[in-house]
Image: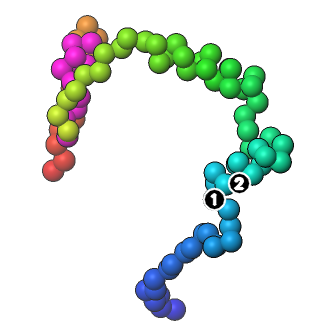
Amino acid sequence: MGGEEIELYVCNTRDDEAGAYERLIGDALKGDSTLFARQDGVEEAWRVVDPILSMKTPVHVYQAGTWGPREADRMLAPFGGWHNPPAAL
């Protein structure tokens, strides 16, 4: 048995197929709510997410490819600090 390299081309849409928003709007016009979140589910999601969005946690910028910002090193100092793994050989 031997393998053969081939190119695979996949097209998941057809010209007569409705797009996601077209289907959603069409369902709304027909009164079909199966693709819509229920109000209690939306409110519960906001109950969980809103406190996180309201937090005033600072964002610390650091150089790409490093192990993180200096603030992280300071945060871990009382616990023995962070020890960067050795570079790959």
Determine which quarter of the picture holds residue 23. bottom right
Frontmost residue, 20 versus 71? 20
The magenta segment is 65-75
Q: Residue at x 21, y 13 (%)?
A: 74
Q: Residue at x 46, y 86 (%)?
A: 6
Frontmost residue, 75 versus 58? 58
Q: Residue at x 73, y 38 (%)?
A: 36
In the depicted structure, whether residue 60 falls above or below residue 84: above
In the depicted structure, whether residue 58 falls above or below residue 10: above
Other residues around mark 1 within 10 Å, as few (<14) / some (14–19) / many (≥20): few
Residue 9 location, x and y as percent? 51, 78
In the depicted structure, whether residue 39 falls above or below residue 32: above
Check residue 84 for magenta coloring: no
Determine which quarter of the picture holds residue 17. bottom right
> For the residue labelled by badge 1, is the local secondary structure a helix, a strand or a loop?
loop
Q: Amino acid at mark 1?
A: Gly
Q: Residue furthest top?
A: 78
Q: Amino acid at mark 2?
A: Arg
Relative to 50, is 19 on the left or the right? right
Q: Which residue is mark 1?
A: 19
Determine which quarter of the picture holds residue 58. top left
Residue 84 shows in the view: no
Q: Which residue is mark 2?
A: 23
Residue 43 location, x and y as percent? 68, 20
